[in-house]
Image (cartoon, grey):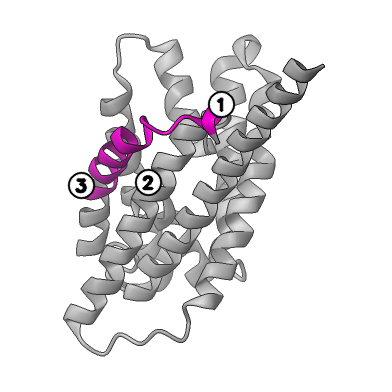
Amino acid sequence: MVGLNRLHVYILKRYLLLLAGLAIMAFGVAFSIKASLGTSPISSVPYVVSLFTPLTVGTATITMHCVFILLQILILRRNYHPIQLMQLPVAFFFGYLTDFGVWAVQGITCNTYWQQWIVCIIGILLVGLGVSLEVKAGVVVLAGEGVVLAICKVLPKVKFGYMKVGFDVTLVAIACVLSIVFTGRLQGVREGTVAAALLVGLIAKQLGKLLARWKLEEI
C-alpha cells in the first residue's frame, strides 16, 4: 500500500509539472503576441486565424490541436493508442491559459522597437522553459509534437529533429498564406518568429540538462 501511494504521488508530481510547463508556455505565447514581432511557429496559425474570425487565440489553438489529434488517428490508425487522447484536455487547458495570458499582459506597453524585443525575448525564454518542463514531466505531449511523432513512427528513417523543423516551417507558411489571403497583408510572422524557431529548442535543451539533475522522487 505504501508503494502504491508513492506511485500515485510520483504520477501526480509529473502531471503537476506538466501543468506548470503548459502555464509557463502559454504566458510565453502571450508575451510573444504582445511584442508584435511575430509569434512562435506553433502559435502562428491560431494567431492569424484570430485576426479574421470570431475565435480568440486560445480557442483557435484548441481547434488546431483537435485537428492535430485527428491527424494522428488518421496517420497511425490501429497503432494509435487511446491514451494519447489525453492531448485533448491538455489542449483545452493550454488554449484557455493562452487567452488568460493575453488578457494578463495587455497592460504592458511597447513604445519602441527595443522594448518589443525585450518582451519578445521574455516570451521566447518562457516558451523554452515551458517546453523543458513538459519534456521533464514525460506524461503527454502537445498535439503538435504528437503529429511529428506519429509521422516519425510511420517513417522511421526520418529523424524527429528534421521532421519538427519541417512541421514548424509548414505552419509558418500556412500562417503567411492565411494572413495575406484574409487580411491583405502579412501578420503574425516576423523576425520574432525566426528568433523563436532558432532559440526555443536551444533554450529547452539547455534547461533540460539542468532539470535532468532534478529527481521527482526526491521531492
| Residue in the image at 55% along x and 76% along y | 103
The residue that label 1 is drawn on is 72
The answer to whether 92 is drawn above or below residue 72 in the figure is below
Would residue 201 be counted in the magenta stretch? yes
In this view, the mark in front (1 or 3): 3
Specify the amino acid type for callout 1. Answer: Gln
Q: CA distance from mark 1 to mark 3?
A: 26 Å
Amino acid type for the residue under numbered disc 2: Leu
- Most frequent secondary structure within the magenta stretch: helix
Crowding near pointer 1: few (<14 within 10 Å), some, many (20+)? many
What residue type is disc 3 on? Answer: Leu
Answer whether residue 155 is magenta in the image: no
Q: Position of residue 137 (x, y in %)?
A: 52, 33
**Image mark for residue 102:** none
The quadrant of the rendering that contains the N terminus is: top right
Residue 171 shows which numbered tag? 2
Q: Position of residue 4 (x, y in %)?
A: 76, 18
Residue 125 located left or right of residue 15: left
Instruction: Please tell me which residue is depicted at 39% across the width and 69% down the height of the picture.
Output: 31
Q: Is residue 66 left or right of residue 181?
A: right
Question: Can residue 197 be seen in the rendering of this structure?
Answer: yes
Q: Which quadrant of the view contains residue 35? A: bottom left
Q: Are marks 1 and 3 in contact (CB under 8 Å)?
A: no
Name the residue that disc number 3 marks.
Answer: 198
Q: Secondary structure at mark 2?
A: helix
Query: Within 10 angstroms of label 2, few (less than 14), some, or many (20 or more) residues?
Result: some
What segment carries the magenta color?
Answer: 199-218
